[in-house]
Amino acid sequence: MPSKKQLQQAEEIKEKGNACVKEGNYHESIVHYSHAIQLDPKNHVFYSNRSLSFLKLQQYYLALEDARKTIQLQPEWPKGYYRKGNVEYAAGHYRSALLSFGRAMLLDPNDSDVRAAVKKTNDEVFKMRKREMWDPYISAISGACIGLFIVIADWYFTKKPSIKTYYYGIIIIITFTVLGYLAMKGYRYIREKQRLALLEQPIDLLKEMDPQSINLEMDSEKQSTDSQDISNSNQRLDGTVGSSGLFGNKTRKRGGASAGRQKFKMGKSHQR
């Protein structure tokens, strides 16, 4: 439990952060709010203010985490849901933002900022639904027009048309129609993945570059290299012993026996 002096100091540091926000110095405001949180980690206002600073810097994941922490510490405070809705709206998650703003409006129906946010988000949701409905068909029609242009250009502006019959022309038009439809579907899929990635936890580069983990990886690589070198040297040693030691000794023994037989025959010839 923080002391009275720590609580007072935390409030003073929060005011410094508020002054930095008014000046547009969001980086420094985050430092002040983080210091205030260290002194009083149960104060939901500090997390709410830091969420705004993170949002201004387009750090959506960190802003959303602080907004959730604000709601966790004070579930009945409408501004926590308002902060969460602002982050979701900025990241393009309009349906989630509408739910957050709706919860804030239930807690404080008279807040003009919340009511304006609900209206603005409702408009975006309506536009998004309209785009989801019509964009694939508009793209398909565009593809059909491109296919039709290619067929007409081949028939009327070339000396020897490549498209011989109407049947092939229809196939080309249908192909470009399907390609236009699929192109829009793929584009929308990529955009949705990008929106989801905005609220995902970023990679912790400091953790990935931890010297201890790097040293462990280097040690394991060195051990595997050393064991591979030892196995290779053992294989070379076994090959040397097998070729020169065993077979070489047999050759010498054979050579010595033949020489003895020759001396024995020569001795018999001298006796005769």
Image: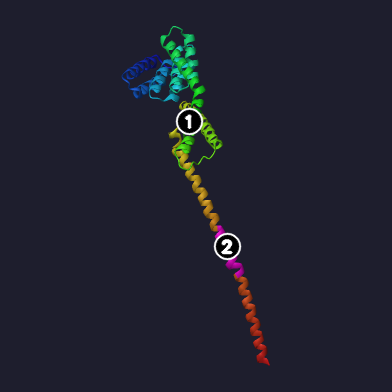
Question: Residue 21: x percent and y percent?
Answer: 34, 19
The magenta region covers 234-247
Disc 2 from disc 1: Cα separation: 74 Å
Magenta run includes residue 150: no
Question: Residue 49: x percent and y percent?
Answer: 40, 18
199, 243: nearer the viewer: 199
Question: Residue 35: x percent and y percent?
Answer: 38, 22
Query: On screen, 222 above or below 112?
Result: below
8, 155: nearer the viewer: 155
> Label 2: how many residues lie within 10 Å, few (<14), some (14-19) or many (20+)?
few
What type of secondary structure mainly makes up the magenta span? Answer: helix
Q: What residue type is disc 1 on?
A: Cys
Q: Is residue 111 left or right of residue 163?
A: left
Q: Is residue 243 visible?
A: yes
Q: Secondary structure at mark 2?
A: helix
- Quadrant in which the C terminus is drawn: bottom right
- Quadrant in which the N terminus is drawn: top left
Total numbered badges shown on the rendered structure: 2
* N-term mark: 2 or 1: 1
Q: Is residue 66 visible?
A: no
Q: What residue type is disc 2 on?
A: Gly
Residue linked to disc 1: 145
Question: Residue 119: x percent and y percent?
Answer: 45, 13
Q: Is residue 51 left or right of residue 173?
A: left
- Which residue is located at x 43 percent, y 34 percent? 205
Residue linked to disc 2: 239
Magenta run includes residue 245: yes
